[in-house]
Image: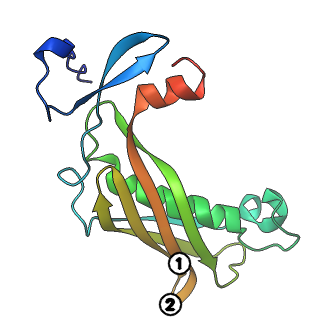
Amino acid sequence: MEQQRPVEPESAREPGSGQESEQVTGQRQERERPPESEGVFPPGLTARVELTVTDVDTAQAVGSGDVPVLGTPRVLALAEAATVAATARRLPPGMTTVGLRVELDHRAPTPVGRTVVAQARLAKVDGRRLLFEVTVTEGTTTVADGRVERVMVDRQRFVDRALGNS
């Protein structure tokens, strides 16, 4: 794994150098701005993941209903897994993507034993934001479709903030 580049002191920074300052308890702390996604992720990028539905994937098991069919939370997780797969090999060192927004229509039930396929296609890149169109199918039936928006972030900074270490 590559190490992050050291940040130059403020006096050596040039405007537009891709770095920003962040005020932290009265001290200036230099932080690198995450790279823009446009050069890293070309629109049209795709990935797919499959799932054979088992009892643990049902609405009954995940607490989203009382029927023994693929639960909506599992459909969503599968769609998100496809978006993660689409970006995984192209991420710069130290970066990751995190979910920001989801729109998902769960259109058809899928019984235990059937296989569903989630397909994600990167439709739009806006700075660090990635908008995916997702579909989940079982054979020729559309089980779900929608959009998933992710944002590229510095992995360590994200985890530090989540743990209150920032």
The amino acid type found where label 1 is placed reads Asp
Q: Mark 2 Cα within 10 Å, few/some/many (few <14, many 20+)?
A: few
- Viewer-nearest residue: 21 or 80: 21
The location of residue 117, given as percent across then percent down, is 50, 72
Against 61, residue 158 (above or below) is: above
At 33% from the left edge and 49% from the top edge, which residue is drawn? Answer: 128
Is residue 154 in view?
Answer: yes
Res 164 → quadrant: top right
Residue at 60% of width from left, 64% of height from top? 76
Q: Is residue 87 above or below residue 111?
A: above
Q: Position of residue 138 (x, y in %)?
A: 55, 81
* Image side of residue 143 versus residue 3, left or right: right
Query: Could you say which disc has been placed on residue 54 in the image?
Result: none
Residue that badge 2 annotates: 140
Residue 5 in the image: state x and y as whole percent: 20, 20
Which element is circle 2 on?
loop
Q: Which residue is mark 1?
A: 145
Which mark's residue is nearer the viewer, 2 or 1?
A: 1
Residue in view at x 69 percent, y 68 percent: 72
What's the CA distance linking mark 2 and mark 1? 13 Å
- Ranked by sequence position, the earlier of labels 2 and 1 is 2
- Three-letter code, disc 2: Thr
Residue at the spot 76% in from the left edge and 74% down from the top edge: 69
